[in-house]
Amino acid sequence: MKEQRKSWTNLILAILPPLSTIAMTVVAYFAAFMGSYILLGSNEDLETDKLGVHVPLFMLIRNLLMLIAFSYWYYIFFLRKKEPDVFENIKDSIRSVKKPAFYALIIAGGYIIQFIVTHILRLLTAILPEFMADYNTEVGSLIHGEVSIITLIYVILLAPIAEELLFRGLTQKYAERAIGALPAIFFQAAIFGIYHMNLVQGIYAFIFGLLLGFIARKSKALFPCILLHMVINLSAYLIP
């Protein structure tokens, strides 16, 4: 009975971090709503939603909130017992995969993965334009439209770190305690797909989540996952 209660507790804790992003989204939206009035006063060409909120600013604030909250959460409950010094933890995470060839494979693999996904999406757009319409509106404009420095910062830098801490860090580790390693990888990947709130993006996010989950489990570190995530996101802007 005690073990069963502990498993349920860890399963709830695995779901809690993704759910907490809802509150962060609300806070970020209102912060961006206020900030947009200041920015709009000096620039009428800002990319805004129907309420006049500067979308890149909203995403930047949201990812900053996630990064701060989840890095602290992950450090307190998973890293502090190993080594109180947070910088030593980061060094240990990088040193945990010692072979430079592994990181070269991560960088090359990230580009290849994005290259394949990009061309599959283009093929689907040609074959099923209506099915891909929502995806191309939401995600395509982010990549192929006018890209600001703010957008690049949160897409390439902040989002990969925050999302790896959230999914391969907190959710996967809590889920492992509740249901075991392999089910936990599928569990966090499924939530990672749902998190993107778009059917097309959710499908390939689920597949990416599985890959990243296996890397996190195999390397026992988040740094390789963060690097791969960054390369995949960056490659979306590099592939013609």
Image (cartoon, grey):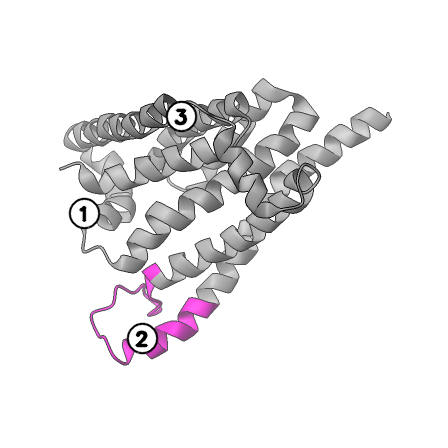
Badge 1 or badge 2: first in the primary sequence: 2
Q: Residues within 10 Å of mark 2 (few under 14, many from 20)?
A: some
Q: Position of residue 53 (x, y in %)?
A: 35, 67
Q: Give the quarter of the figure containing the N terminus.
A: top right
- Residue ranking furthest to the right: 1
Residue 22 counted in the magenta span: no
Cα–Cα span, label 1 and label 2: 23 Å
| In the image, residue 19 above or below residue 213 | below
- Residue ranking furthest to the bottom: 41
Q: Where is residue 9 in the image (x, y as percent from the top left)?
A: 74, 36
Residue at image x 35%, y 77%? 37
- Asked whether disc 2 touches disc 3, contact meaning CB atoms under 8 Å apart, the reply is no
Compared across the picture, whether 90 is left or right of 125 comes to right
Disc 3 marks which residue?
Answer: 207
Rendering quarter of residue 227: top left
Residue at image x 81%, y 25%? 3
Residue at image x 51%, y 24%? 219
Disc 1 marks which residue?
Answer: 144
Q: What residue type is labelled 2?
A: Leu
Q: What stretch is highlighted in magenta?
A: 31-56
